[in-house]
Each structure stands twice: as C-alpha cells, then as structure tokens.
Amino acid sequence: MPSRPAFAALLLASLTAGCAVGPAYTRPTAPLPERFQGQAAMDQRTATGSADLAQWWAAFDDAQLARLVKIALQQNLDLAQATARLAQARAAVGMANAALLPSGNVGAQAARVYQSVETPLGRVLNANPGFDRHGSSYEANSSAGWELDVFGGLRRGKEAARAEYQASEAGAVAVRLVVAAQTADVYVSIRGLQARLAIAHRQVETEQDLLDKVKLLHGKGLAAEMQVHQVESTLAQVRASIPGLQAGLSTAMNALDVLLGALPGTYGATLAESGRIPAAPSIDASGSPAELLRRRPDLIAAERRLAASNARIGVAVAEYYPKFSLSGMIGSATSVSGGNLFTGGASQAAGVLGLRWRLFDFGRIDAQIEQAKGQEAELLVGYRLAALRATEDVENAFSALVNSEAQVAELKRGVESLTRARAATFAAYQKGVVSLIEVLQADENLLRVSDARAQAETEAARAAIASFKALGGGWRLPAQNVAAIQ
C-alpha cells in the first residue's frame, strides 16, 4: 500500500490538473469572400412573400408542398439513419465520461468439490486420517479501480468524443435540410412536368386540327403536299415528346415516394391532379458570406470533426507519459459453510497503486502521433474545401435563380404578345381576312412559348430551393455547437 502522503499527492495531482498534453485547438479560418458575387442581383429581386428560414418551404405558399415536406421529415429513412448515428455518438460521449470516473465490481462464488481416492492426489490425501472427500468453498469480494488522468489523455478522449457528437448533431441537421430541399425540388419538378404535359396535349390537338385543315386544302388543290408533310412532322415531334415527359413524371413520383419513406406509388394519387408551379419567394441574402455560411450544418460538422482530430493528437501524446491507477478489494472467503461467510475470520483486503508506462515503445507512439497529425491535416483541408464548395453552391444558386427569373419575365412578355396576336388573328379569321390555318399556327406558337415558360418557372423555383439549401436553411443548431464555432 502506498503511504498516505504519496496517495494524497497523486490524487490531488489527478483532480487539479487543469491542462492536458497535446495541442490546444484553434478554429481555423475559411477562405470566404467579403461579399457574394450574386448578392447585388439578389437584392434587386422583386419576389413576393417573405421566407422564415426555419420553415422556408412555407414561403412558396403551397399547402401540398408544406404537407409533403412535413411527412418527409417524419418518415424519411436517411433521416432515421442520421438519428441512429447521433445516438451512437451520444453513447460514445457517455463512455468517455465514464472513463474518468472510478469503476467498481462485486463478485461472489460458491463451489462444491468431490475428490476421488482413485486419482494420484486422492491417494495421497486419503493417507491422512480424517480425510474428507467432499469440500465446499464460498467467496464474496467487492473491488474498485480508478485510472488517475494525470496527463490528460482521458480528458482529450472526452474532448474528441464530445466534438464527434456535435458533428453528428450537425450532420443530422444537414440531412434534415437535404431531405426538405430534395422533397421540395421533386415536388416542383412534378408540377412543372404536369404543366408541360398539359401543354403538350393541347399542342397535339392544335397540330391535329392544323393537319386536318391542310389536308382538306390539299385535297382541293389549295395547299402543296410539302405543307402536309411539314405539319405531319411537327405533330409527330409533339407526340414523341409526351412519352418522355410521362417517363420523367413517373420517375419524379417514385423519387418522392422514396423520400417520404414509402413504396413507389403510395402518394401518386394525391398528386394526380395538376397544380400550379410554386413561385420563388423572396430570399434574405443580406450579411457577409461568413455570417450566411455559419448556418450551414455541413460546415459545422466538418469543423467539429477537425476539433475531434486535434483532441486525438493529445490522446496519442499522452501515451508518452506514465499512467497511474488506484485499485482496492475487500471481501471474505470460507471453506466451511456459507452461513459464516461474513462472520468468520477469513476476510481479505487489498489496495494497489498501479503504474503503466510504455517506456520502450516510443517508436510506436511516435507513429501514432504522426498518424493523428496526418488525419488532422486531412480534415483541415477538407474543412477549407467544404467552405469553398459552400460558397460555390451559393453563387451557383443565386445565378440560376436570377437568370431563371429573367428568362421567366421575357417568356411572360412573349406569352402576352402571342396571346394578343392570336386574338387578333382569330378576329381577322372571323372577318374572313385570314384562314383558319393562320389561327392554328398562332395557337401553335403560343403553346410552344408557354412550354418554355413552364420550364423556366420550374427552374426558377428549383433555384430558389437550392438557394435556401446553400444558405443553410436557417436550422437552429444546438447551443453547444453554436458556441463551439464562435
């Protein structure tokens, strides 16, 4: 047993050691610009509505979209996996905390022994007068042990586990953001494809009417055969586009079902009736890129994993130093009967001060430290690369949104002009100034521009969704994660 002064000194050193070996963590800087290139254009948008970033999908003013996103956040299987990973990380923190605390065990055993006199040992014992061939033994012990974290290796392990848990929290939030964005994106694609299919069917009707009129005129010798073939070719092209649009719609419907954690075909009936393409809402893009990207959970997860790798360097460095432990045992044993196990004089006790020191293993420790430093260097580059890609995501989303909306505005003016032209052509037809062919051709031009407009509106809404996702979606992260990245 160590002397009381030595024991007290070791215990005091363990409990009051405020520092731990290994490098202290400093949050790295990320290569971010002072202002996004597309921020000025975003400020000039004239979109309607305002988005609450906590539930940005509500700003699209589409009850069906909001309902589907809610279902996805409740049932999506990727999100369920992220939640399970978070539970594992939480358990790892519990184990790291427990490593700093004493551990105890209680053990007991009872044995009944019979010794045959036919064995060599039995013959020797049988030679003694009064040899009892039957024997019983009882034992009960209570033990405790405690590793004194003098140099902070266990505390560094706790630090790493906590950072990994924070990374898992941010990772779960990132999955929620991705699931919400993917659900909204697929829903918008479905509405866009439905609109284009409706336009394509109207185009088929228009082209068929036009073909019938041209054939009638050709039969009377008033139209050339070439005109008949031209209209037939156009009609075939429009009809050929419908299967492709239908296949795309089926694929999108199936993708939505999987996002909602259901078998393909489960929610298709609820979207069978066409709806409007949601309009892109306003997006608050004010603030610096550093402020905007601080909301991105994937960047927070990357930074927390970097912090964990830094702590693991300390865990490896701590192997240079000796490890001390305290252990003790108290119990009782008897070979007579269990009734006097705790009353007899066969008590036993022990106290041990342990020392473990990898004194001749420094080469392996050096390699472990270098490996930990290499992992930290890799994660540092990964964090900075993630910041660059996050900036790229924002710039691309802003550019796509602004340009798609500009395209929508031009096509809207085109639709309005062609609508007026069609009305004028029909009025002229009623007066006998132009033929029905001109009216049908005006309808054809209007439908083609309407299809282009539907595509542009779909892309604008998808770009708005990508913008919300690129900006982090406004999810509120746990307080410990927010504090860790300040």
Image (cartoon, rainbow, N blue to C red):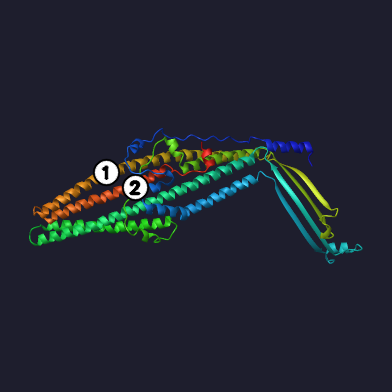
Labels 1 & 2 near each other (Cβ < 8 A): no
User: Which of the 4 image quarters holds residue 33?
Assistant: top left
The residue depicted at 82 percent of the width and 61 percent of the height is: 136
Callout 1: SS: helix
Most distant residue in the left direction: 221
Is residue 44 rendered to the left or right of residue 165? left
Give the image location of residue 309, x and y in percent: 55, 41
Q: Is residue 28 visible?
A: yes
- For the residues marked 1 and 2, what is the alpha-carbon distance in whole angstroms? 14 Å
Residue 294 position, x and y percent, is 46, 39
For residue 241, above or below residue 457:
below
Total numbered labels: 2
Earlier residue among tags 1 and 2: 1
Quadrant where the N terminus is found in the figure: top right
Q: Which residue does the image show at 65% across and 45% down from the upper left?
A: 99
Look at label 2 and name its amino acid: Ala
> Of residues 450 and 25, which is closer to you in this image?
450
What secondary structure is found at the residue carrying circle 2?
helix
Q: Residue at x 30, y 43 (%)?
A: 405
Residue position marked by numbered label 2 in the rendering: 461
Residue neighbourhood size for the residue with mark 1, other residues' Cα within 10 Å, grouped as few (<14), some (14–19), many (≥20)? some
The answer to whether residue 408 is left or right of residue 288 is: left
Q: Which residue is mark 1?
A: 409
Left or right of 408? Residue 100 is: right
Q: In x, y percent, where is residue 14?
A: 69, 38
Q: Position of residue 200 (x, y in %)?
A: 25, 56
